[in-house]
Image: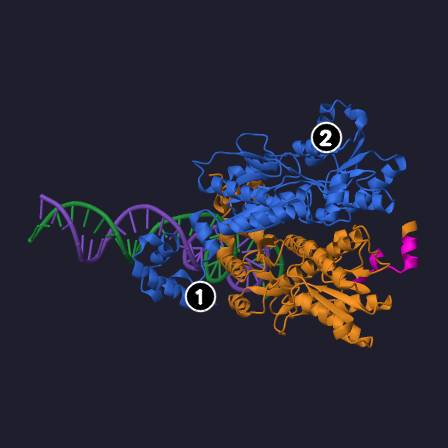
Chain colours: A blue, B orange, C purple, D green
Amino acid sequence: MGTVSIREVAARAGVSPGTISNVLNRPERVAPETRERVLRAIRELGFVRHGSASTLRAGQSRTIGLSVIDIGNPFFTDVAAGVEEAASELGYAVIFGNSAGARDKEERNLLVFAEQRVRGVLITPSDDDRARLDALRERGIGVVLVDHPAHRPDECSVAVNDFAGGQMAIGHLLSLGARRIGYVSGPRSIRQCAERGRGAERAVAAAGLDPETAIEVVEAPVMTAREGQRAAASLLASGLPDAVFCANDLLAVGFLRELLRAGVRVPGDVALIGYDDIDFAAASAVSLSSIRQPTHRLGRIATELLLDECDHPETHVHQQVMFQPELVVRESTAGRAQAAEREGA
Amino acid sequence: MGTVSIREVAARAGVSPGTISNVLNRPERVAPETRERVLRAIRELGFVRHGSASTLRAGQSRTIGLSVIDIGNPFFTDVAAGVEEAASELGYAVIFGNSAGARDKEERNLLVFAEQRVRGVLITPSDDDRARLDALRERGIGVVLVDHPAHRPDECSVAVNDFAGGQMAIGHLLSLGARRIGYVSGPRSIRQCAERGRGAERAVAAAGLDPETAIEVVEAPVMTAREGQRAAASLLASGLPDAVFCANDLLAVGFLRELLRAGVRVPGDVALIGYDDIDFAAASAVSLSSIRQPTHRLGRIATELLLDECDHPETHVHQQVMFQPELVVRESTAGRAQAAEREGA
DNA sequence: ATCTGGGAGTAAGACGTTTTAATCCGATCC
DNA sequence: GGATCGGATTAAAACGTCTTACTCCCAGAT
C-alpha cells in the first residue's frame, strides 16, 4: 500500500518516531537542521499524517460537525460557506449533515458526530429539546447554537434578532403610510416566523394601531415561491392590504409575481418587503426590499466561538451573540420620488 | 470523562471486548441472548463507538470527502444535498470543502481528506490537472468526478451533457423563428460554458446558418444576476437579437430584469432561455424557460458509484455517466398562444 | 466411549500516533 | 576538573478498536 507511516519517515531521516511527531506538532522543540531533514523526508516519501491515529492518541480531533435544517435554503448555504471558510482557516475539517427538519435525521447526524469524536458541533436545532445537546457536552463536545438564541447562560449561540427584524419591516411599511398590512408567515412553529410576527405586532401597536385589525396573517405551510403565489392569490380574492411583509424572500418573490401578473402595481398599489435579502431579491422584476441578515458572518462567528470554547475552555466565556438585521430598501417599497430617481440611474 | 470504552461495556455485559466488537460488526456471529445483553449494556452506559480507533485498526473509514467549486451556487447546493442524502443512507459521513475555484484551496481540501483517510472523494475539479487525484488513488482513496466527464476509462465520473444542453437551448430558440441569437456566456475557461457554447454553434450550423454571424457572444466575468443585467444593457445599446441564451439562470434573471425595465417585451420582442432550472426560474416576473439538470440525482449517483468502487473493488466497473439535460419551456420563450393560455390558467 | 465438527466466545497483538520520563551530551559554573 | 544544567532526542507505553488464532464445550456420528 502507498501508506507511509511516521516510522518510515523516521528511518529515512535517521531519527526516532517521536521526533517526527515533534516536528509535526511542536517544531520549536526540534533543532533547525534536524527539522529540515525530517521535512525533506516527509516530502520525499509523500507522508500524510494519519488523522485517526492522531485523534485516538491525542484524544481530540480537528473536525467539527455542522447540522443545518435545510441546505437548499440560501440562508443556510451562506451560513455553511462562512463556517467552512473559518474552519478551514483554523485548520479544522467540517463534517456536514442536513437534518431536513426531521428529528430522527438530526439525531443520526449527532450520533455520527459523536462517533467521529468531533471537537464541537454547530447546530440549528429543529426543536427545543436540549437533552441531546447536553449529552454531547457531557462527552466533552462543544456545542454552539446557530440562528437560535440560547436560553441559558452556559452555552454559546449566534443568532439574528428576528423580533427586531419584524419590527423594522413593519415600521418601514408604516412610514410609507400603510395602515392595513398583510403578514405572509411560514409555519408559526418555526421560531423565526413567530418572532418576526411578534415584532410586526409590536411595531403596529407602537404606532397606535390595533394589531388584531391592522395585520392580516396568512400562514404558508412551507416557505417557497409557490406558496407565496398562493398567498397572493388568496389576498387578491379577499381584498389587498396597503402593504405586505413576507417572512422570507422566497415567499416574497412568488407573492410579487402573482401581483404583477394580476396587474397590481408594486409599490404603487401595494408595497412589499421580504426577509433574508437573498441574491435574487435585487434581481426580481421589481427589485425587492428586504431585511438583510449577516449570514456569512453568522457562520464565521459561530465557528470562532466554538473553537475558542474548545481550545481555551479555561478563558472562554460563553456568549449569546445577537446580530441586528438591516433594512434594505429597494423598488418594491420605494416612495414615488425614489422610484423615479432609481429608474433614471 | 464521559467517555465509555468497549472494555467497560464488556465488563458490564460479562463478556470479552472482542464480543462487543462482534456485536457491533458481525452480530450474526453472536448468540442472540448474549447480543441482547451487550446491546442493553451499550444503551445503559451510553457507549458510542470511537470512530478513529475503528478506522485506525480496520484501515478504512466511513467518511467521504466532497469538494465543490462554489457552494453558493444552487446547482452545487443541490448536488451536495443529493450526496449527503445518499451517503447518510449508506452510513457514511460527509466531510465538506469549498474550493471557491482556487487551486490551493482545492489542494488543502484534498490534504484534509487524505489525513482523515476518507474512503473516497467526490470532486468537481477546478482544472484539468489529474496528478493530485491520481496521488489519492495510489493511497487507496477512490475518486469520482462530479459534473466533469472523465477523460480516461479507469475512473468514474458523473456529468450532464453540456454540449447537448447548448444545442437544445438554441434548437428551441431557432424553432421559435429566431435567426439572430445572443449567447451570454460565463468565462470560457469554465468547461461548462465552453461546452454549452459549442453546442450552440453546432445547432446553428445544423440549421444552415453561419455561427459566426448568427450568434453574438457576450462573455461575463462571473455568472451573477448583476452581470446578466450588464450584458443586457450592452446588447440593448448595440442592438438586440431575436433571442438570447444565457449560460445559467442567474445571468438570465438579471438579463430579463434589465429588458423588462427597458420596456422590451419577453418573449414578444426577445425570447430568453437560461440554464440550470433553479427554483427562481419559475418564479421570476416572466417565468423563465431553462435547461434542467438532474442535480440531486447527480449527487446521489456519484456517491453510489464511489461507494460501490470502494466497497466492491473487484466487481466494480468504472463508469462515465452522462445525463441528458431537459428543456423546460415557460413563458419567456412560449409562443403567443401558449402564453395566452398560461395567463388564463 | 471416543472422535469429529462447529458454534460461541476469548486472549492478545496489531493499527499509527502522541506523550512522558528518561537518556545523552556538550556547555557552563564554581 | 567535577558537578550541574538544559537543550535535543529517544524509548516505550498508551489511546480504543478489530481480528486472528485459539480454547471451550456440547451435539451428533462412529
Name the residue beneath numbered marker 2. Answer: A200
Judge from the rendering whether residue B175 lies leftward or rightward of residue A287; answer left or right.
right
Let me know if residue A4 appears in the view. Answer: yes
Q: Mark 1 lies on which chain?
A: A
Q: Do the residues labelled 1 and 2 touch (CB within 8 Å)?
A: no
Give the residue type that dot 1 points to: Gly
Task: Report the residue marked by disc 1.
Answer: A46
Q: In the image, is residue B23 above or below residue B294?
A: above
Q: Looking at the image, is mark 1 or mark 2 earlier in the sequence?
A: 1
Among the 4 quarters of the image, the one containing residue B87: bottom right
User: Residue at image x 87%, y 44%?
Assistant: A263
Classify residue B211 as left or right of residue A63: right
Magenta range: B326-342
Q: Is residue B90 above or below residue A216?
A: below
Q: Distance between the residues labelled 1 and 2?
A: 60 Å
The relative height of residue B156 versus residue B82 in the rendered view (above or below) is below
Secondary structure, mark 1, is loop
Residue A106: numbered disc: none
Q: In this view, does D26 lie to the left or right of B338?
A: left
Q: Quadrant of residue A190?
A: top right
Q: What residue type is labelled 2?
A: Ala
User: Who is closer to the viewer here, B314 or A308?
Assistant: A308
Does residue B339 belong to the magenta stretch?
yes
User: Would you say residue B237 sits in the magenta stretch?
Assistant: no
Q: Which of D17 and A219 is in front in this view?
A: A219
x then y, percent, for residue D3? 12, 46
Q: Where is residue A61 in the image (x, y as percent from the top left)?
A: 48, 49
Same chain for labels 1 and 2? Say yes or no. Answer: yes
